[in-house]
Amino acid sequence: MKNSKQFIVNLASHPLRSRKFFFLLFSTLVVLFLLVSFLAGQIFIEFRSESQKTRTSIEKAEKLIKDVQRDEKRLSSRIDEAVKENKSQVDLVNSIILKKSFSWIEFFSDLEKSLPGSSYIISLAPTLTDESKLLLKLRVACSSVDDLLKLIDNFQALKFYGIRIDGETRNNRGLLISDISLSYERTI
C-alpha cells in the first residue's frame, strides 16, 4: 500500500477558505472607513468654525440693530422736541412766505376785470388765510341790480367763489351799495 494515494476530504460543516482575500477586503474597508472619518472630521471642524463665525456675526448684527434702534428713538424724541420748540417760528416764517408769494397784481387785475363799467369799489378788506386763499369783504357801488348780477357772474367766471351778499342799501345818488363777502384762490 505504499503506492496508494490518499485523498483528504474535509467533511466539516464549514469548509476552510483562504483568509488572505478576507483580510485584504477587511483592511481595505478599514482604510476607507478611516479615510472617510478623517474627511468627515475635517468637514465637521470647518463647518463648526464657520458656524461659530456666523453666530458671532449674528450677535454683532443684533447688537448693532439694538444700538441703531436706541439711537433712532433718541433722535426721534430730539426731533419732536425741536418741532415743539420751533413751531411758532416756522409758522411765522411760512406765513411771511405765503404773504410774499401772493400775486397781488393778478388779484387786482381779476378784480378789475369783474367790475362792470358803471360800478366801482368803495371799500376792500382782504385777509390771507392758511389754506392759501384770500377772504375778501367788499363794498361795491352799482348803478342797478343788473350791474350787481353781472358783477356776481363775472366773479364766478374768474377765480372767485363763495360769493355772498351781506346787505344792500341805496345812497342819496340812487346807487345800489352792496356788501359782498367772497373768496379768491391765490396762485403760487
Image (spheres, rainbow, N blue to C red):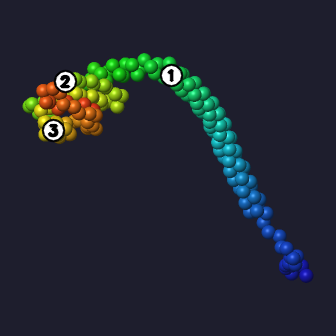
Name which of mark 3 and mark 1 comes first in the sequence.
Answer: 1
Q: Nearer the viewer, residue 173 or 178?
A: 173
Kindly give the residue lying farthest to the front in the view shown. Answer: 172
Amino acid under disc 3: Val
Badge 1: residue crowd in 10 Å (few <14, some 14–19, many ≥20):
few
**Which residue occupies 48% across, 23% down?**
83
**Which residue occupies 30% across, 29% down?**
135
Q: Which residue is mark 2?
A: 122
* Residue 130 left/right relative to 43: left
Q: Secondary structure at mark 2?
A: strand
Q: CA distance from mark 1 to mark 2?
A: 44 Å
Q: Which mark is residue 17?
A: none
Q: Which mark is residue 84?
A: 1
Image coordinates for residue 118, horizontal then vertical, percent: 9, 31
Image coordinates for residue 160, horizontal then vertical, percent: 23, 35
Amino acid under disc 1: Lys
Q: Report which quarter residue 68 is drawn in.
A: top right
**Which residue occupies 78% across, 66% down?**
18
Name which of mark 1 and mark 2 comes first in the sequence.
Answer: 1
Kindly give the residue lying farthest to the left in the view shown. Answer: 117
Image quarter in which the C terminus is found: top left
Asked if the residue at tag 1 contacts the one at tag 3, i.e. Cβ–Cβ closer than 8 Å, the answer is no
Q: CA distance from mark 3 to mark 1?
A: 53 Å
Q: Report which quarter residue 154 is drawn in.
A: top left
Q: Which mark is residue 145?
A: 3
Depth check, mark 1 against mark 2: the one in front is 2
